[in-house]
């Protein structure tokens, strides 16, 4: 099978770049205020090259668009980022347009996180990844001003962090074997299903490893019967959970599946913001929180409280992104059941250090804020 | 009317004291660990004398039992307290017995708030005030270690704090007038109804002041029709909300009242812990969070997230307690609709400074933790 045939769709290959893209034609890519004691938001589009082509049920890509964000306040810098996989409807253009509207100079106190984020959220109804980039940078800044990492500010214990899965894309047996070898640090393997060859893919994985697996169907199963067929095939194969078996709108079919499935059914594409939890609790066993969907750390933290009140399972996923957003998610991972925080490993050149995989767990550093450090020579100047 | 005739019931007068009560007959009143870098919990029963006799629908008292708590860690002291009004089923005996079982020496890191509080919560099913005293002291300690007050750690803005009500007990017109005069700092008056003379009481209040009022029926109305009669009488009298119109078990009657009432109906005695919110959301418009019911600040903060997800109104009340527990509640009051944090004003001799009433709002100080300072000569040695 030619791996290149997966490179379909949005012509993303053209945009692949490890160097910063100048957005001068789009207007100011950075934003400054002159007042002292005020916050300054700066941002820079920054495409992330992937280590492997990423093959999902509906598309494939070799790079992923991203935007790096900094909030500066009295000499302290908070780092954030937006990662925009095409299916979420955001792009370099929408994110930079949104960030251009964010005027933090009206706030003289970064500690007013709730008020600042309420302002940011009200600028536009969508733009969740753009909002997340501000939220992450603000948390990093405030954590640094406090002098503590967020897991400590939230009162969490690192030894409660669950093992993270590592995602293996749909591919030829040879490539899958190679990828599983690369994933030896991780104790749980996640596979993306939802194509015609699901059972084959499961068999390939099970030939390569006996580690527990998680399944992300990525809305790929067309009927509830098709879904149940694969789920039954998975039932005795040590599968921890199944994400998004069918399309978002198929709620009743999903409830039908959930009732019959011995494996928990988790909401991903259908789940974005806090109020969705109330709507989804009768159809799914759990939720997949991703910072780029939740608008960041603040709302993700609230999601966990709400989902727990309903007895729901919680996983925390990610996009393909640098250690910046991964570290931000890792801060709240002591509160979740399953982590799926491998996004930084999927990119070719990480520009931050600050997360480590220890015993299969994605651990944040003990540094304040989100705990990351830009890597000299890799983190772009802006 | 003789005010002394209100002093009925539990013989609390005998226990009234402003000086610490020795509990040596009950065993060790303090708890120490010898290891360094560990937390030490100490506690001391401390009865609070009331400024006025406190007259509710079901009983009256001149003092209130309390327990002062300290958690020490590497020379830093976090302050907490338990306040035990008789109707919550806790007493000096139950609180000190519970606190004797709390062994914090097993934790070497006070930042692990979630883990420590989960341990404390699991010691016994009830003892909510005792648990709150540990939670408050731990938050005070960690806030001091961080160097920030909790409202800042939680990302809140002080200018979102709502005006607090001041409670005027059922009494003779002369005493009510005197109390309203004393309450001139407050812009909202709360009255306790649920006796036979409710309309009289409303008339007395409305003769004395045109400030907005809140009504706490304290489960005192016997039938839904009786409740609606008073509520209709209140409808054009600038009443913000009505707490606990009927007994806890009268959920359907409460829903009946709620459907007809032009004034929001708030759950108080029926509401204690986080999971209650899911049960009560279809019967009440909102909840009254009190730290002595919620087991402290951590769960209270989660309650706000959950209640907001259901579109519920939130008030934060208190017991008769020192500025310690009031300051703790004030930390999260930027998130609520109505504050009712006058408990420290009701006691004769406060032992902490650290909250101020500004423009009718109970404001925490800018000091770290819960922001209080023990008053020399008043705060007991232990």
Image (cartoon, coloured by chain):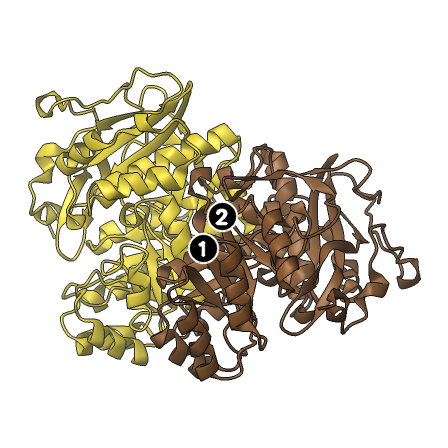
Chain colours: A yellow, B brown
Q: How crowded is mark 2: few (under 14 residues within 10 Å), some or many (20 or more)?
A: some
Residue, disc 2:
B187
**Rounded to the nearest whole Å, what is the CA distance between mark 1 and mark 2?**
7 Å
Relative to B86, does residue B120 appear above or below in the rendering?
Answer: above
Lateral position of residue A198 relative to residue B233, left or right:
left
Q: Where the C terminus of chain A falls, by quadrant?
A: top left
- Decide if residue A138 is in sight here: yes
* Earlier residue among tags 1 and 2: 2
Relative to A120, does residue B230 appear above or below in the rendering?
Answer: below
Numbered circle sitting on residue B212: 1
Q: Residue at x 78, y 72 (%)?
A: B10
- Decide if residue A336 is in sight here: no
Q: Is mark 2 on a helix, strand or loop?
A: loop
Front residue of A273/B199: it is B199
Lateral position of residue B260 relative to residue B301, left or right:
left
Q: Locate residue A171, reporting x and y percent.
A: 20, 53
Q: Quarter of the image holding residue A228? A: bottom left
Relative to A374, does residue A200 appear above or below in the rendering?
Answer: below
Total labels drawn: 2
Q: Locate residue A249, reporting x and y percent.
A: 16, 67
Q: Quarter of the image holding residue B285? A: bottom left
The reply to whether discs 1 and 2 touch (Cβ–Cβ < 8 Å) is yes
Spot the residue most to the right. B25
Q: Locate residue B290, reporting x and y percent.
A: 57, 59
Front residue of B20/B152: it is B20
Q: Locate residue B365, reporting x and y percent.
A: 58, 35
Q: Quarter of the image holding residue A264? A: bottom left
- Say if labels 1 and 2 share a chain: yes
Q: Is mark 1 on a helix, strand or loop?
A: loop
Q: How crowded is mark 1: few (under 14 residues within 10 Å), some or many (20 or more)?
A: some
Q: Residue at x 58, y 78 (%)?
A: B196
């Amino acid at each position: 099978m030619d791996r290149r045939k997966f490179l379909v769709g949005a012509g993303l290959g053209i945009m692949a770049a490890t160097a910063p893209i100048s957005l001068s034609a789009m207007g100011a890519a950075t934003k400054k205020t002159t007042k002292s004691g005020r916050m300054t938001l700066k941002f820079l589009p920054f495409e992330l090259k992937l280590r492997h082509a990423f093959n999902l049920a509906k598309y494939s890509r070799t790079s992923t668009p991203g935007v790096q964000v900094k909030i500066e306040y009295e000499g302290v810098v908070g780092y954030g980022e937006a990662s925009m996989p095409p299916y979420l409807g955001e792009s370099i253009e929408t994110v930079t347009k949104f960030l251009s509207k964010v005027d933090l100079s009206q706030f003289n106190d970064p500690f007013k996180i709730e008020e600042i984020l309420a302002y940011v959220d009200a600028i536009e109804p969508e733009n969740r990844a753009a909002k997340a980039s501000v939220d992450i940078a603000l948390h990093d800044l405030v954590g640094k001003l406090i002098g503590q990492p967020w897991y400590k500010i939230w009162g969490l214990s690192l030894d409660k962090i669950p093992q993270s899965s590592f995602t293996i894309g749909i591919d030829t047996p040879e490539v899958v074997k190679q990828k599983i070898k690369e994933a030896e640090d991780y104790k749980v393997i996640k596979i993306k299903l939802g194509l015609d060859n699901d059972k084959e893919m499961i068999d390939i994985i099970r030939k390569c490893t006996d580690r527990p697996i998680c399944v992300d169907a990525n809305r790929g199963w067309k009927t509830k019967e098709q879904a149940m067929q694969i789920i039954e095939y998975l039932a005795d194969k040590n599968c921890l959970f199944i994400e998004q078996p069918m399309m978002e709108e198929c709620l009743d079919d999903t409830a039908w599946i959930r009732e019959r499935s011995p494996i928990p059914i988790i909401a991903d594409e259908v789940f974005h913001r806090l109020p969705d939890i109330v709507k989804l609790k009768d159809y799914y066993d759990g939720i997949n929180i991703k910072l780029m969907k939740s608008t960041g750390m603040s709302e993700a933290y609230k999601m966990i409280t709400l989902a727990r009140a309903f007895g729901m399972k919680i996983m925390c996923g990610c996009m393909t992104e640098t250690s910046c957003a991964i570290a931000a998610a890792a801060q709240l991972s002591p509160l979740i059941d399953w982590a799926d925080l491998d996004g930084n490993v999927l990119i070719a050149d990480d520009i931050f250090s600050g997360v480590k995989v220890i015993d299969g767990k994605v651990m944040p550093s003990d540094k304040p804020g989100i705990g990351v450090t830009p890597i000299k020579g890799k983190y772009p100047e802006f």
